[in-house]
Amino acid sequence: MKPEPERARNLACTLFLVFLLGGCATSPQTRLLLDNPPDLPQQVELTEVPFFPQKKYYCGPAALAEVINFRGGNVHPDQIARQIYVPELKGSLQVEVVAAARQYDLLPVELDGRLESLLRELAAGNPVFVLQNLAIDLLPVWHYEVLIGYDFDARKMILRSGTNRRITRPFATFEKTWQRADYWALALVPPDQIPVTASAGDYLDAAIGMEQVGRTAIARQAYETALGRWPDNSLAYSGLGNTAYALGDYAAAESAYRAALERKPDQAAIWNNLAYALAAQGRRADSIDAIRQAIELEPDNPNFAASLGELKSPQ
């Protein structure tokens, strides 16, 4: 997955806003958005997003609980705090937020850092989990919030923030505080949904992350969902094959690996995986043929030579 932004350090969540410079002169995304208004509703507010007034330094747990409960979960910020809050830092790290979201079977899909994308997600009914630096780079005041809407006419974002069920912030101000946090934002979605602005790469990063922490069935569903939008994506087919294999569905794994190879026949690792899916079905000769394809593509890779030896040995 993408590396955590450089500023992913202690997130001291405060209950106040410090002095912020206003105006669009240093807010290029806001200026572009206003010069070229997107084809979106003028006002959106996801009023059904729950609200949990945060305890001191608990902006991460409170904001994450709001999105999880919106998605049908049933969790209190105190429960999430036990997973993500780091007392010595007086806050929560982004990597811990991502890990916690996975535990509730939600894919944490990182968005592209565009203000317009936030509006498009909100218009599609997706609240957005965002990180802000409410001060300046030299004296950062990190704060997690949930975007729940916008008012294009008033040029304001609408948020759940701290002890405030509803606050508004001008587009330009929001852009600057968000920019100071490297434009970090997540759409947290169930595995049968894709954020409307997500790229294939970012969505598949989230699916791979889910697979890597052992949420195999959820990851498999996410790969299937990805193929609904990107039907020629070989990485999605490969991931589908890996998760099917891990779940013991070897015929489905074979089918997915073959679909991946139809699109990228030079992927030696997929030939290797296909060999094991075939062997698991008792098709020894086909399995040997597949691993030999991998070796032909990468003759110096010792892993494939080891696979050949393993697949040829008596079971």
Image: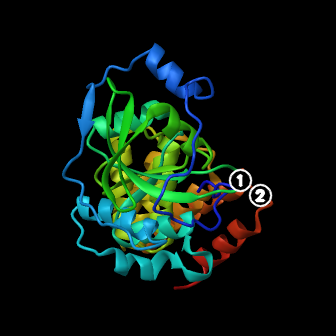
Instruction: Please tell me which residue lies in front, 191 or 110.
Output: 110
Tell which residue pokes out farthest to the front in this image.
19
Quarter-of-image position of residue 28? top right
- Residue type at mark 1 is Glu
Quarter-of-image position of residue 125? top left
Residue 251 as seen in the image, left or right of residue 290: left
| Residue at 44% across, 41% down | 198
Is residue 20 visible to us here? yes
Instruction: Please tell me which residue lies in front, 36 or 159.
Output: 159
Residue 128 as seen in the image, left or right of residue 49: right
- Residue type at mark 2 is Pro
Residues marked 2 and 1 touching at CB (< 8 Å): yes
Residue 247 picture location, percent across and down? 37, 73
Category of crowding for the residue at label 2, using alpha-carbon neighbours closer than 10 angstroms: few (below 14), some (14–19), many (at least 20): some
Residue 193 picture location, percent across and down? 30, 49
Q: Which numbered dot is residue 21? A: none
Instruction: Please tell me which residue lies in front, 283 or 30.
Output: 30
Distance between mark 2 and mark 1 Cα atoms = 5 Å
| Residue at 29% across, 75% down | 76
| Residue at 19% across, 52% down | 48
Quadrant placement of the N terminus: bottom right
Q: Which numbered dot is residue 299? A: 2
Is residue 245 visible to us here? no
SS of the residue under disc 2:
loop
Category of crowding for the residue at label 1, using alpha-carbon neighbours closer than 10 angstroms: few (below 14), some (14–19), many (at least 20): some
Residue 295 picture location, percent across and down? 70, 58
Residue 145 picture location, percent across and down? 42, 55
Tell which residue pokes out farthest to the top in this image.
35
Instruction: Please tell me which residue lies in front, 21 or 293.
Output: 21
Give the vertical position of 309 relative to 45 (above or below). below
Q: Which numbered dot is residue 296? A: 1
